[in-house]
Amino acid sequence: MRKRFFFNNLSHTLSLAMLPILLLSITHFLLSYRDLRSNTNQDTLDKLVRTQEIIALMFQDSSKVLNFLEDPSLINSINKTFNKTKMSYDEYLTYKYVVQHLRAIVKNSNYIDSIYVYIPNEQGFYLTSNASIHSYFEMPDKNWLTICEANLPSRFTRRNAQLYASIPDSTDYLTVVEKSNNDVLVAVNIKVG
């Protein structure tokens, strides 16, 4: 009988002692959950804002090139180079000016690997920031124009590509493509990692 009385009183006392601990634990959990949720929402929002800023910066680089190429004399000079017609000295200087501008953009940023400029032409030629003119039929990097075929004014994609024939391994790139109103395509290749 005493044993039974002892265990009844012990269970009753422990229940009463555990009740405040249980209530405090539930309250702490609910408050922590609310704070954790608001912190997570704020962190997610901050990451989205940073991502948006990074994407805007990437498109800003391609927009610089497109704004630079709005001058018809620059486009005519590049087209004449693509068509292998005889260039005047002024057109040659204009072509060199375009190449120097592309090189300056690449050298001034530590994340851009190369820039491609494509003006629609029958030979499939495009200009690169290293002053080379390549045909997309013969260049190691053959898949960048397929990215450009969509009728979107701008887009970006992550891809493995071999941009240079001298480097046998493909590298991971983020390619930002932007198209102007006069059908000039600019692809900015950013090395990932």
Image (cartoon, grey):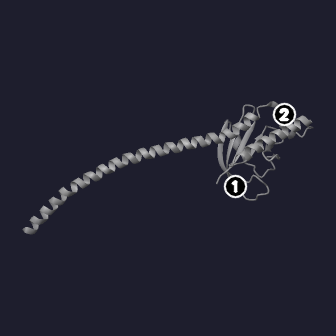
Residue in front for this viewpoint, 183 or 48: 48
Q: Quadrant of residue 88?
A: top right
Q: Residues within 10 Å of mark 1 (few under 14, many from 20)?
A: some
Task: Establish if 78 lies above or below 16.
Answer: above
Q: Position of residue 87 (x, y in %)?
A: 91, 37
Q: Is residue 122 visible?
A: no
Q: What residue is drawn where x is 31% and y is 50%? A: 28
Q: Quadrant of residue 116?
A: top right
Q: Is residue 137 left or right of residue 144?
A: right
Name, please, the residue furthest toward the front. 108
- Quarter holding the C terminus? bottom right
Q: Position of residue 104 (x, y in %)?
A: 76, 43
Task: Establish if 158 lies above or below 98.
Answer: below
| Three-letter residue code for mark 1 | Thr
**Residue under label 2:** 76
Marking on residue 95? none
**Residue under label 1:** 171
